[in-house]
Structure formats: structure tokens, C-alpha cells
Amino acid sequence: MEPAPFLQDIAEGPEGAKAHWLRARDGTRLRVGVWPAGPKGTILMFPGRTEYIEKYGRLAGELADHGYGMLAMDWRGQGLSDRPAHRRDMGHVVSFDEYREDVDALRAVLDQLDLPKPWFLLGHSMGGAIGLRAIYDGLPVSGVIFSSPMWGIRMSGFLKAISGVVMGLSKPLGLDKNFAPTTGPAAAMEYNDNPLTNDRDMFNYMEGQVAQHPELALGGPSIRWVNAALEETAALMEMDPPDLPMLVFLGTDERIVETPAIHTRAASWPGSRLQQIDGGRHEILMEGDAMRGPVVKMIADWCAEVLTVKRKTG
């Protein structure tokens, strides 16, 4: 590992955070950030598409108040990690196996980072798909928490109808590195009726970070990324649920990921808990204090409950 930049000016998290460069097996340079150790354990935060370490600075502070340290990752193609050579503002992978390489690079250094155990996974949106696959691959955590996990992609009826044709033709025609239909370059979002959060302060926090550091911005995904995501989510939904306790949060005003997939996966997962958040949008961890505070407390209480059960059952 080598020292990497950490943008403390926008994170608003606990003091003492550090970032490091990692190398994936294929040579991709990745950035991982660590907030100070917590006496009760460590949350491994797997962010969603377009996200970056500093976005979770406030959450790191709230988890620290409950006794937990936190780690977060810049996936390839976003944050300050290496981006696609053909267009740095486009989300692009050929296969979600590339994200598995990112997780492998992280796993190789977890012990060096001296993160207090137990470890818990917290996966948001795309990080929920990457995280679920990581669990199947043996990520050593005591329990898993998901926020609006991407176990299916919400698409309009029109896009669903043409997706097979578009995906099938894009690669032979050399179009799979283009932006997916209805997406494009990074652009500022307006607060009114945004699909992410009800809270203007948190919206301004997220938008302000990118305004101050445009190098963090990311536009839409490529056609190939969408195809890879559809393949991965379909494969994950076919697998038997892991043998780990699971807590999943889903807002009733979710507009980005496919909610039936979350209900189906939770119903099939023994010992899982699906917590629906009334009025919550996609970024439940970026909602206002009245909504986010109880969610963070539920996470901390659930982690303690998992450890209590584990101690009793040996």
C-alpha cells in the first residue's frame, strides 16, 4: 500500500482518516479510505455507482458515535481510482468480475490496515451487488447490511423491451462503450424531485462535494456496464442465500433499483430482516437526521444483536 489523497475538506468525518492506494491483479490502481478505529468493530462500506470515499464522511462520524470505525472503497472507474481509458466520465466495465478483483485487492490488505474486529459489510446500491458476490466469495464478516441494494435494475417498459436487441447488437457494432440510452455525461442534479434524498442539506452536501472536486464526478454507465450489471444481478438472484445474518433497508419511495428483487431475496434469506423506511428514497444513508439517525442506530443495535446471538450459540 502507498499513501493516497484524502479530501478531508469535503468529507466532514472524524479526524484522522487516511487513504491508501491498492493494486488489483490486472494493475488497476484503487483507493481505499479508513476512518479511525472503533472499539466495537469496523464497518466495511461498499459504495454505489458514481460514489467515492468522502461521500460517507458524515456516516463515518455517526458510526463512530456508536463505537464503530469504517472503511470505504473507490471502485475502479470512479472516485480517484483508475478510470476507463476511453472516457473517464463514463461508468464502464466489461464484466462485474472486475469488481471482484477490486474486492480481492482489498481483502489482501485488510489485516495490514489493523481494523478492529468484528467486521460487518454495509453495501449500498451497486455496492450491494458487489457485496453480495463478495459474501459468496468468502469475505470474512460477521453480518451483512444493505441499503437499497442493486439486485435488479429498474428500467422503463420501453428500455426493457429493447434491451435485448440493444445489448445484442452493441458489441458487434462497436457501440458497447457508448453511454447507455437515456444517460450521458456528468451533470449537476436539481433538488426538486430528485430520486436520492428528501433532505436539502444532505443533497447540498453531496452536490457540493463534486462541485468543489470535479474530478470525483461520474456520468452515466456504458451499454456494456448495463449488460454486465444485468448478467450479474440475474446470476445473484439464482443463488441460494448465504448463511449469514442480513439486515436490508429499503425506502418506500425507491426509484432507482428494482424493489421486487429486494423483497424476493429478503424473503428467501433465513434470518434476514427487511426494514422499509417510510418515505425514504434511494439514499437512505443520506436522508435527514430524523430518518437517518434511527437507521444508523438500527445498524449499531443490529450489529450488537448479531454478536450477542453468536456468543450464545458459540
Image: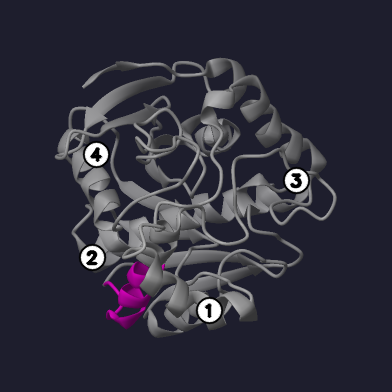
Q: Nearer the viewer, mark 2 or mark 3?
A: 2
Residues at marks 2 and 1 touching, judged by CB atoms closer than 8 Å: no
Residue under pointer 2 = 136
Q: Nearer the viewer, residue 202 or 214?
A: 214
Q: Earlier in the sequence, mark 3 or mark 4?
A: 4
Q: Quadrant of residue 85?
A: top left
First in sequence, mark 1 or 4: give its number: 4
Question: Percent x, y for residue 1?
Answer: 21, 22
Q: Give the mark, 2 or 4, whose residue is nearer the N terminus.
A: 4
The mark found on residue 162 in the picture is 1
Give the Cα distance between marks 2 and 4.
16 Å
Residue drawn at x 72%, y 39% as measured from the top left: 202
Assign a secondary structure to mark 1: helix
Residue at 30% of width from left, 58% of height from top?
A: 96
Task: Identify the amino acid type marked 3.
Answer: Gly
Q: Is residue 213 above or below residue 81?
A: above
Tell me if mark 3 has few (under 14), some (14-19) or many (20+) residues whose alpha carbon lies within 10 angstroms of its own. Answer: some
Q: CA distance from mark 3 to mark 4?
A: 31 Å
Mark 2 residue crowding within 10 angstroms, few (<14) / some (14–19) / many (20+): some
* Residue at 43% across, 74% down: 272
Q: Is residue 26 above or below residue 127?
A: above
Labelled disc at residue 106 = 4
Up-down relation of residue 221 to residue 236 (above or below)? above
The boundaries of the magenta stretch are 230-242
Q: Earlier in the sequence, mark 3 or mark 1?
A: 1
Q: Nearer the viewer, mark 2 or mark 1?
A: 1
Query: In the image, which is nearer the foreground, mark 3 or mark 1?
Result: 1
Q: Could you tell me how far apart the alpha carbons at marks 1 and 4 are, in whole angstroms?
A: 37 Å
Residue under circle 3? 288
In this view of the protein, which residue sits in the foreground, 166 or 21? 166
Q: Nearer the viewer, mark 1 or mark 4?
A: 1
